[in-house]
């Protein structure tokens, strides 16, 4: 799955799944544009990549800000010359039962998780159309497929990402641009790490493979979809969930 000569933009790459995706793409040979709000954490990821012989640069960006997205994408293209691969990973949660959920918590999650992905796609698609090659990969969630109590905003944003994936896939397929989604299940991240031990145990019992997934499990799936080997796959949702949801 060599990605030599490719340039990948990874949003939300300062930690967790985004960081793992950025490192994995760099290992495959891609130059990586690291984008997130926390510049200090981004610098740490860049240091890890360059320290291993890879190429990376950091770009401060809040995907909920259209101006941030526009200026960051311009900066990436100015530095690297193009964008071949876009990983829409940036996302947040603001959990609450629907009867108590504030409109502001609904709006900020949808604006970040869904509208942010739309903004990034819109800004990078010109570069991909020009070169007639591209890979767009949206990181959704199993909760966008099955729902989750207390996460109406998050589940709606992740379900929306699946619809966005399929719609854009149809629009750009004739230009050799694929658009896919990866749907992680229960993954070992800082967010899940804070859960009580008994809750983790009950979750593991629901997973046919019998373990919590790692951020590398997700990153490997992303790297495959970004590769030439996945050139005949588009509009697809790749489940990385240990078998919780099948079909």
Image (tube, helix red, strand yellow):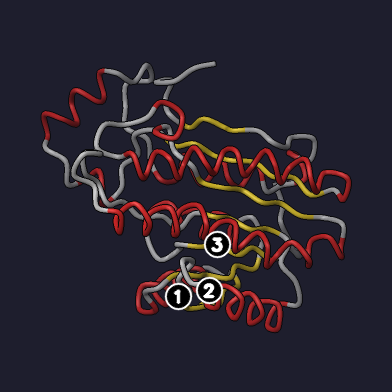
Name the one closer to the observer, 150 or 18. 150
Whole-angstrom CA distance, mark 3 to mark 2, is 16 Å
Check disc 2 and report the residue beneath it.
Answer: 50
N-terminal label among 3 and 2: 3
Q: Quadrant of residue 150?
A: top left
Q: How many marks?
A: 3
Tell me if label 2 and label 1 are in contact, CB under 8 Å: yes
Q: Residue at x 51, y 46 (%)?
A: 139
Q: Residue at x 71, y 56 (%)?
A: 3
Tell me if label 3 and label 2 are in contact, CB under 8 Å: no
Residue 10: where, in percent of width, then height? 55, 62
Tell me if label 1 and label 3 are in contact, CB under 8 Å: no
Q: Quadrant of the C terminus?
A: top right
Q: Quadrant of residue 19?
A: bottom left
Other residues around mark 3 within 10 Å, as few (<14) / some (14–19) / many (≥20) = many
Check disc 3 and report the residue beneath it.
Answer: 10
Using the image, determine if residue 247 lies above or below residue 28.
Answer: above
Check disc 1 and report the residue beneath it.
Answer: 47
N-terminal label among 1 and 3: 3
Name the one closer to the observer, 84 or 144. 144
Using the image, determine if residue 203 lies above or below residue 20.
Answer: above
- Which tag is nearer the camera, tag 3 or tag 2? 3
Other residues around mark 2 within 10 Å, as few (<14) / some (14–19) / many (≥20) = some
Could you tell me if residue 19 is visible in this image?
A: no
Q: Residue at x 48, y 72 (%)?
A: 65
Whole-angstrom CA distance, mark 2 to mark 1, is 5 Å
Horizontal side of residue 69 vs 85, given as left or right: left
Residue 158: where, in percent of width, then height? 46, 42
Q: Secondary structure at mark 2?
A: helix
């Amino acid at each position: 799955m060599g990605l030599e000569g490719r340039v990948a933009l990874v949003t939300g790459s300062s930690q967790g799944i985004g960081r793992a995706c950025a490192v994995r793409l760099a290992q495959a040979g891609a130059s990586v544009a690291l984008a997130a709000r926390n510049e200090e954490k981004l610098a740490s990821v860049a240091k890890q990549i360059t320290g291993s012989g890879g190429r990376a640069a950091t770009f401060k960006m809040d995907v909920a800000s259209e101006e941030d997205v526009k200026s960051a994408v311009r900066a990436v293209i100015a530095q690297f010359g193009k964008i071949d691969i876009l990983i829409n990973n940036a996302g947040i949660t603001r959990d609450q039962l629907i009867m108590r959920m504030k409109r502001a918590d609904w709006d900020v999650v949808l604006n970040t998780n869904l509208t942010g992905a739309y903004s990034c796609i819109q800004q990078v698609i010109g570069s991909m159309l020009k070169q007639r090659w591209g890979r767009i990969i949206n990181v959704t969630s199993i909760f966008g497929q099955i729902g989750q109590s207390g996460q109406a905003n998050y589940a709606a944003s992740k379900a929306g990402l699946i619809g966005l994936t399929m719609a854009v896939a149809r629009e750009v397929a004739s230009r050799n641009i694929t658009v896919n989604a990866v749907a992680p299940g229960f993954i070992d991240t800082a967010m899940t790490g804070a859960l009580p031990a008994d809750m983790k145990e009950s979750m593991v019992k629901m997973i046919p493979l019998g373990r919590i997934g790692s951020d590398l499990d997700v990153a490997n799936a992303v790297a495959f979809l970004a590769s030439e080997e996945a050139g005949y796959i588009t509009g697809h949702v790749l489940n990385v969930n240990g078998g919780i949801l099948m079909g």
